[in-house]
Image (tube, helix red, strand yellow):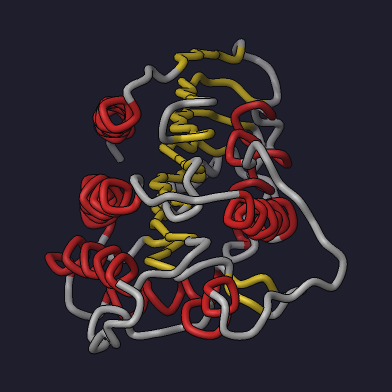
Amino acid sequence: MNSQAVRDYLLDLQQRIVTALEAADGNPFLRDGWSREPGGRLEGDGLSRLIEGGAVFERGGVNFSHVKGRVLPPSATQHRPELAGAPFEAMGVSLVIHPHNPFVPTVHMNVRMFAALPEHAPAVTWFGGGMDLTPYYGYERDAQHFHRVCRDALAPHGPDLHPKFKAWCDEYFFLKHRNEPRGVGGIFFDDYAEGGFDRGFGLIRSVGDAFLSAYLPIVERRQGYAYGERERDFQAYRRGRYVEFNLVWDRGTLFGLQSGGRTESILMSMPPQVSWRYDWAPEPGTPEARLYTDFLRPRDWVNETPTGLWL
């Protein structure tokens, strides 16, 4: 295990992404470094990069963290019960971007490495990550572009990974209490240890390096679209689903809170303006209704022939 190589890559990835997003927005990201003193429940360091009230991005965070802890929290051992109680090391880059314009989707990306460090056994290392798109107004062209970049990123690692990770994403980012997907998906994988350290590290590099190509063309395509109060109201309503998922179901959020992580960085993914309405549904035939009927369901975005109705 070469944790220094992973750390170096992740810090470089964070800087490349922030530089590109700053260029798209025209405003700088805040830089907030932090560290934990050795000897506590959790030790390590991180770098949070945040924008609020930008020209394009209403709120966005691109976080790096590298921590070591005495005991793996339950959220990290649910698939590996034999490692319960072991010390651990974890590092990753995680980002969530919430644009102003409702026609520009919210996006999430994460790449990470975990290592359990049992006292009398070799280290056990695994990787995870992915990216997913959460539109408020659906466009087939955007969803197809995002999924095809994800497919191409995974292609060097074998033709079986994209169908598997796409289905895993559809399953993971599903609000069970609402019986609906959070968005149009992407790719997701967790507890990945096949092929050892080099294969897993190569996989997260491919995913991380593909993010800007997957997302920025969509931002550029939709940012100039005019919107009004109706679209912003719907955006705030759908953002409520994002909050519900992150606080109820997301393993990353649970891991951070259970392990004693930095709360400000963990909750940076929350959107700035959100609303809930009691028992509300959009009028049939409206663009808001089409999000539910045509986009918030699993689709084979890579191979599907577009209808041409929502480009």
Q: Where is residue 163 drawn, in percent x and y?
A: 31, 80
* Rendered-image quadrant of the C terminus: bottom left
Q: Is residue 40 left or right of residue 286?
A: right
Would you say residue 96 is visible in this rendering? no
Q: Quadrant of residue 12?
A: top left
Compared to residue 255, the image places residue 265 above or below, namely above
Q: Is residue 177 left or right of residue 30?
A: right
What residue appears at the point 51 percent right and 43 percent down from the top-left corner? 98
What residue appears at the point 61 percent right and 60 percent down from the top-left corner? 82
* Rendered-image quadrant of the N terminus: top left
Q: Where is residue 178 drawn, in percent x and y?
A: 73, 75
* Number of numbered labels in the structure image: 0
What residue appears at the point 42 percent right and 79 percent down from the top-left corner? 167
Q: Where is residue 296 drawn, in percent x and y?
A: 53, 77
Front position in the image: 193 or 9:
9
Q: Where is residue 70 drawn, in percent x and y?
A: 65, 32
Q: Quadrant of residue 19?
A: top left
Front position in the image: 183 or 32:
183
Compared to residue 102, the image places residue 37 above or below, namely above
- Residue at far left of view: 156
Would you say residue 215 is visible in this rendering? yes
- Residue at far right of view: 278
What residue appears at the point 41 percent right and 37 percent down from the top-left corner? 93
Front position in the image: 112 or 61:
61
Q: Is residue 155 left or right of residue 89?
A: left
Compared to residue 51, the image places residue 186 above or below, namely below
